Amino acid sequence: MTTFSFLDDYSEGAHPDILRALSDSNFIQQAAYGDDAYSTEATTRIKAHLGSDFGGEIHYVASGTMANIVSISSCLRPHEAVIAVNSGHIVVREAGAIEATGHKLICVPAVDGKLTTDNIEAALSANAHFPHMAKPRLVYVSNATETGTIYSREELTAISALARQRNLLLFVDGARLGAALASTKNDLTLSDIASLADIFWIGGTKAGALLGEAIVICHPALARDFGFHVKQRGGMLAKGRLLGIQFQTLFGHSNLFFENADYANRMAARLAEGILDSGHLLDSEPATNQVFAILPDSVIQQLKQHFDFYVWAKRDDDRSVIRLVTSWATDVKQVDAFLSRLVQL
Amino acid sequence: MTTFSFLDDYSEGAHPDILRALSDSNFIQQAAYGDDAYSTEATTRIKAHLGSDFGGEIHYVASGTMANIVSISSCLRPHEAVIAVNSGHIVVREAGAIEATGHKLICVPAVDGKLTTDNIEAALSANAHFPHMAKPRLVYVSNATETGTIYSREELTAISALARQRNLLLFVDGARLGAALASTKNDLTLSDIASLADIFWIGGTKAGALLGEAIVICHPALARDFGFHVKQRGGMLAKGRLLGIQFQTLFGHSNLFFENADYANRMAARLAEGILDSGHLLDSEPATNQVFAILPDSVIQQLKQHFDFYVWAKRDDDRSVIRLVTSWATDVKQVDAFLSRLVQL
Amino acid sequence: MTTFSFLDDYSEGAHPDILRALSDSNFIQQAAYGDDAYSTEATTRIKAHLGSDFGGEIHYVASGTMANIVSISSCLRPHEAVIAVNSGHIVVREAGAIEATGHKLICVPAVDGKLTTDNIEAALSANAHFPHMAKPRLVYVSNATETGTIYSREELTAISALARQRNLLLFVDGARLGAALASTKNDLTLSDIASLADIFWIGGTKAGALLGEAIVICHPALARDFGFHVKQRGGMLAKGRLLGIQFQTLFGHSNLFFENADYANRMAARLAEGILDSGHLLDSEPATNQVFAILPDSVIQQLKQHFDFYVWAKRDDDRSVIRLVTSWATDVKQVDAFLSRLVQL
Amino acid sequence: MTTFSFLDDYSEGAHPDILRALSDSNFIQQAAYGDDAYSTEATTRIKAHLGSDFGGEIHYVASGTMANIVSISSCLRPHEAVIAVNSGHIVVREAGAIEATGHKLICVPAVDGKLTTDNIEAALSANAHFPHMAKPRLVYVSNATETGTIYSREELTAISALARQRNLLLFVDGARLGAALASTKNDLTLSDIASLADIFWIGGTKAGALLGEAIVICHPALARDFGFHVKQRGGMLAKGRLLGIQFQTLFGHSNLFFENADYANRMAARLAEGILDSGHLLDSEPATNQVFAILPDSVIQQLKQHFDFYVWAKRDDDRSVIRLVTSWATDVKQVDAFLSRLVQL
């Protein structure tokens, strides 16, 4: 008997609608390198969410690290630095990808996984001995954050206002933007983000695509020559149609992008409720598709026989925090099996 | 009425066997980042072609430019340079991607699209004023070349021998390695290349995959820490399974990789013969899936109404060279339609 | 009336012996780019301090930032990272110079300005999720530290042992190595450092030279091709003699390097004693040529009329910490003038 | 008996006026990192040569390679490339320094050592397949060139006009700008160059300084944040006074910069005339301080016993071209000794 994985939200392939769209379009010849009709249509559909005065561009790349590399390195001059939280994805999960393009990361503590205006101000004060210090120029946030928390409209608006006041660019890593926007706690829209950020990206990989992220460049000035950067960093696919078809499908009539995220969040909520009902505690109330539960180590050992998940941190002598991640593909029967197992133990 | 494209070999999606394999495996959970069962099986299958004493590793990335970036930058210290022909893909078609990782390209003339030992020797002689000149360290060739020509076993063996004698690494860009190996003029095997080169890659994108290239690191020393480079450059897919499934299929029982390439080459040969039969000349005898034909400009104008292709170069006052590219997906009826049109004109 | 500066140890030109040596040698023709007789002699003289089994090389560059850039970037592959304290010179005083060569800095808290084995271990534990995290490979320390503290033989030996055990390189930034070695608290020799570190540099700029730092590469493997890196980063002077003559003089019969540092340290000690005698407190006992004194803000204002120094930090409502830096060129009369002024206030 | 060197123009130390200025100012305390009174005065003096509407900045760095690195990398975005001649200093004498900052060099043939508008146009035409090719953005020329030829006012004006028309920046490497401007064939002034170029530098090292180059940024937009780049690349000296004093002296009352260059050129002319008088031929008429003479190999062997110089190229079976370089420090007695030796042979 095999185990079911709650390790991450990229253990399966793609949503069936996407596979179907790939099959249906397979023999239609298209221009290469993103100049295909599907990418054009995907862009039209995404732009419909961005507000009528959106004047920027959208480019598609294969991976989240690539989206971060291209977005950040295309914006900055060599001496300019990025402000991010210590736990930021670009800080600790991308093998030094941003530094490899030549830029310093200025790291500050996170509050509930998030960057705060206070910590941005602190970073600016501590990095003002010019020209001996790199010049802070871009603020990096991810929504949802590494721990699944989300920014409120008020929080992101405050960060955006501070950034504009201090001549900083605001960049939003949206690897799990779908989960954030579909959260019951969320009050932001794609259009809000497009007006608050200078550049951001919409993650497809964790929202039901085989791969692919849509970089939204809000600032026309930052969009200039963007394709060169995508090409130079190795992010441009010959068959750009592959990305176009997927985003066209995700942002089609069925609102698949939001549907998939909503489903994942609901599976997480179901897990969270069930865990509480079983008499155990959560480490934090889940906002998106990650659940952090506090369980006895003995229970964890038993659950591990049937389910895969990360043991996140030791809590005390007998208990640990585990992380459960759900996705568009999570089988509700497995969720219930996990919970009934938990009740038994 | 629409036109049929002979512009390139990446105008369609993927071979149906690949789409089927993606569908069949879609809901099977797998480990991320290339640690999935499909990538493991793909590697086993490719290694079966590499000779019994192959001791290296295979890694999968999304694009050809990424394969070049990761392969080259992982091998070199900052002061080391690459020798390539003026027309090399990394020289003129990748937006300065290799220089962006910090390395100089030392360019020499191509002979029939190829690098020669004489030109390598010349590059070494002209770049020996150390430490004022960057140190030549890696020889870059692509097989097939940018113009569709291929290296013979004798030629590649001579380059490899010179490289070893002069302490240079030999790297083969295999974006169209399938077309090269399936050529009727070819006398190289994958196993030969694995023993002659230090690192090379097998192109999937132009051989029927949606995307994906397999980097074969022949040297165990060069394989050390390779995954870090893939990750750092943005080349690692969360759903690495997407690349594994495709290469597993390409190198399965049906030998799809070689079949697809053989088909493309045969379509090119059919075009070439038909063009000669119609009384026109070729600029060169085709070795792979590219045909360079010399046609009157008036004829080219007429053909353009029904077919897409590049006008490669002016030949004389009335004639130009056109390039026709075929692929695994080229419709033989369109080949014949092109030829009958040509006869009519 | 003008002020006397205790701002730093590079406000004057060079020790007169150095100017004399420059004049004396001025019209003697020499080979360029470091192949001059003076550089050779300087290397011989420095090597005499490094122990009889020193098998490495010495290279000279113009600035401390250059010494750090060349030393670090020549050692590392692209995915390798540096461990340093938050207050490290490369972290906060070199405008992102190391990141500009592509490498991540992993920062840990300092203890008394210093890196500890515990904090190295913590950095290794927190950066082990490979290949998603950059690989820690080089440990950066400076001796003396940014705040003028020094490493004991025991401390540096422990760091070196840990580095070797964990396959890390140990690099010592020696911008103020003279002050450290001349400290009355010091128990390290140049020879000790050469055996404990893999690469380090001896600062000339702050020890009486016009400019210049001597990079000592202890490891023969790290010395291979070193000149290329110096050249490529712009650190090689056409008139390398300028650096050779200065280091030849600093390490000549009169032991000028150590004499200058000892003098600077004695001037700092004199300041420290005088401050204590005047009834004020020090923030820490000075080990080298930096004195941190706690003075009433009103006193500081008065002193500022005649002396330049940094106000380092607010201490409480009425008092601040000031920093006084001495050098080989500090006029003892100005030291005494400062102290008598302080007594008066 | 020792030999006299005509190898290069940096075999001696500094002009005595410079050594004297260093001594005279030695104990005057100054602000660090270029904020000293000498650098300010040097800038005032240089600006007096640049025309009354010069609105840019001047920064000082230690070496020519550093001047090229900082000037070029501060101007360009990552995807932008440099157009230069094959024989350009940045192409073949700086160990890949520009590529190490991430930028491609697009190389074209030189005509008489120089870049031509035709060759710039050709480079633009051949590098227009965007975004697959890096974007040409900066034109690099050096004056004098690697072979000692110089640009006329007409030539540089044509290049500048083309650059502006095609949105390219014009950068002039002035390692031997003194020799060029002091040439009897020259019709350019510093003020002309400041109005034709966007950024250029004035070489001190080869004009009698110990080291140092003055970067003149003509464009205010390019000057923004320039100090960060100097710092980040390791080009900023703690004792920036060392550079300020030298340029203040070179551009003082005695016009030492031009005097030194004029002297070097006159020594070269004296060599050239003497060689012609002795019945031998020149490979080209000297414009600056380099003489290329065609001599029998047997004569060369004899001369080598008393003089050092480069044998530049084989001419025919019995003769070679030698290169003789003169400088501000060339002893006229050695020039005459060389010539009388030649007559004897």
Image (spheres, coloured by chain):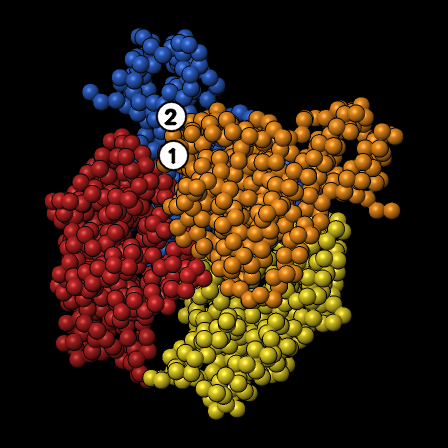
Chain colours: A blue, B red, C orange, D yellow
Tell me if residue A23 can be seen. Answer: no
How many numbered circles does the render carry? 2
Question: Could you tell me which residue is drawn at 56 percent across and 59 percent down?
Answer: C241
Residue behind mark 1: C167
The spot of residue B158 in percent (x, y) is 20, 63
Residue behind mark 2: A325
Q: Would you place residue B277 above or below residue C123 in this image?
A: below
Chain of the residue under the numbered disc 2 shown in the image: A
The spot of residue D276 in percent (x, y) is 51, 89
Q: Residue furthest front?
A: D1
- Between A223 and D208, the residue placed more toward the observer is D208
Q: In the image, what residue type sits under mark 2? A: Val
Question: Which quarter of the picture shows residue C25?
Answer: bottom right
Question: Could you tell me which residue is drawn at 46 percent across and 40 percent down?
Answer: C51
Question: Which quarter of the picture shows residue D127?
Answer: bottom left
Q: Are marks 1 and 2 on the same chain?
A: no
Q: In the image, what residue type sits under mark 1? A: Asn
- Between A52 and A190, the residue placed more toward the observer is A190
